[in-house]
Amino acid sequence: MAEKIKVLVVDDSLIFRRFVEEALQGEDDIEVVGSVMNGAKALDFIKAAAVPPDVVTMDVEMPVMNGLDALKAIQEFNAISGSPHGIGVIMVSSHTKYGMDTTIQALEAGAFDFIEKPNEGGHEANRDRLKKSLTAKIRQYTLKRRALSRQGGTVRPAPAPLPSKPATPVVSINRPTSVAGTARAVLIGVSTGGPKALATMLPELSAAVDLPMFIVQHMPPLFTASLAASLNAKCRHTVVEATDGMEISDNHIYIAPGGMHMVLRKTDAGRINIGLNAQPPENGCRPSVDVLFRSAASVFHGDSVTLILTGMGSDGAKGAGPLKRAGTHLIVQDEATSVVWGMPGSAVAAGIVDEVLPLGDIPLAVKREVDRRRKAS
């Protein structure tokens, strides 16, 4: 029988801790090994445990030691513990602005994902929503970490440092069969592990190319505004949460707002602007990467560079098909630097990928492709 995934629940509300335990009850492969009221108690539990937990569900706002400080302390513990896969942290966020902003900080600092505290509907409906979301995130993260550890691979909870010189692709799968036009945009799809990946990659990428960039990061409403504000402080480009009808410009990064699909469209005057809609989710997601990619294929054709980064599920693989046929250059993040390799792996399985690279190598790869196209045109 496979070893159970050990979970420590951390929240200053006893009621919510019991609610999380109830949501995880009955899962044959998951065991709640502890329940404590703040970050300091969590560290005491971890240091005293004969076998540390695999995952900690961490409340953001707590007395004594809050979630962000506790996350940093757990990362320090991971660095010195010699554990083969380390303790993963999933943040539990409230709907306050402070809670959302701090959650983004935690994700950029290395928490692998987050969940919102349910606040709509009855007890059973909230429990079931929490159960579905939390169990999927816990399993995907832990099983990947254990698999890499068994294979003798290097587990990298944080992306590798960005290189100072051009890197050789780890894998080159398909080279473009035709010379596409000059790249006019960078398209990015990302999910689990995305805020950390974006905070690591975008400052270097925006310094390397002046193209507009469009990002679908799977995230609920309101959180994407906090993400955009955080990234804007780090990047040379101006980073904004997209609005309906917004005209695009170079040196700008546009993030799809949570709960809305983002599409690109041409105006009667021949300019390109952004459209938002609340059509049904695709791949269980709204915003969906597939929706953005399909619209980009009709606007930019193949005149783009497309990135699929760390993420659970397969969103982006189908939508990248029309882009690839039109001539886009498709780069995906490799498995070792991805928190979850679902989205990149699905694109690789579809046979449409040009390069598979560690996250740190992607900005220079994009620049090389943009420069290549400019010379070719």
Image (cartoon, rainbow, N blue to C red):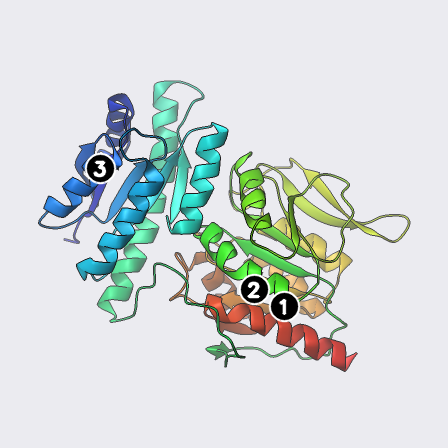
**Residue 283, horizontal then vertical, whole percent:** 52, 46
> Which label number is shown at residue 40?
3
Report helix, strand or loop for mark 1. helix
**Residue 240, horizontal then vertical, whole percent:** 65, 45
> What residue appears at the point 27 percent right and 42 percent down from the top-left corner?
56
The residue under label 2 is 204
**C-alpha separation, residue under disc 3 versus residue under disc 2:** 35 Å
**Residue 165, horizontal then vertical, whole percent:** 53, 79
**C-alpha separation, residue under disc 3 versus residue under disc 1:** 42 Å
Asked whether disc 1 touches disc 2, contact meaning CB atoms under 8 Å apart, the reply is yes
Query: What's the residue type where badge 2 is placed?
Result: Glu
N-terminal of the two: label 3 or label 1?
Answer: 3
| Viewport quadrant of the C terminus | bottom right
> What residue appears at the point 39 percent right and 29 percent down from the top-left corner?
117
User: Would residue 175 appear left or right of 87 to someone viewing this image?
Assistant: right
> Which label number is shown at residue 208?
1
Query: What's the residue type where badge 1 is placed?
Result: Ala
Q: Nearer the viewer, residue 303 or 88?
A: 88
> Which label number is shown at residue 324?
none
The extreme top residue here reads 122
Query: What's the residue type where badge 3 is placed?
Result: Ala
Asked whether disc 3 touches disc 1, contact meaning CB atoms under 8 Å apart, the reply is no
> What residue appears at the point 75 percent right and 81 percent down from the top-left corner?
375
**Residue 26, horizontal then vertical, whole percent:** 21, 35
Q: Nearer the viewer, residue 46 or 256?
A: 46
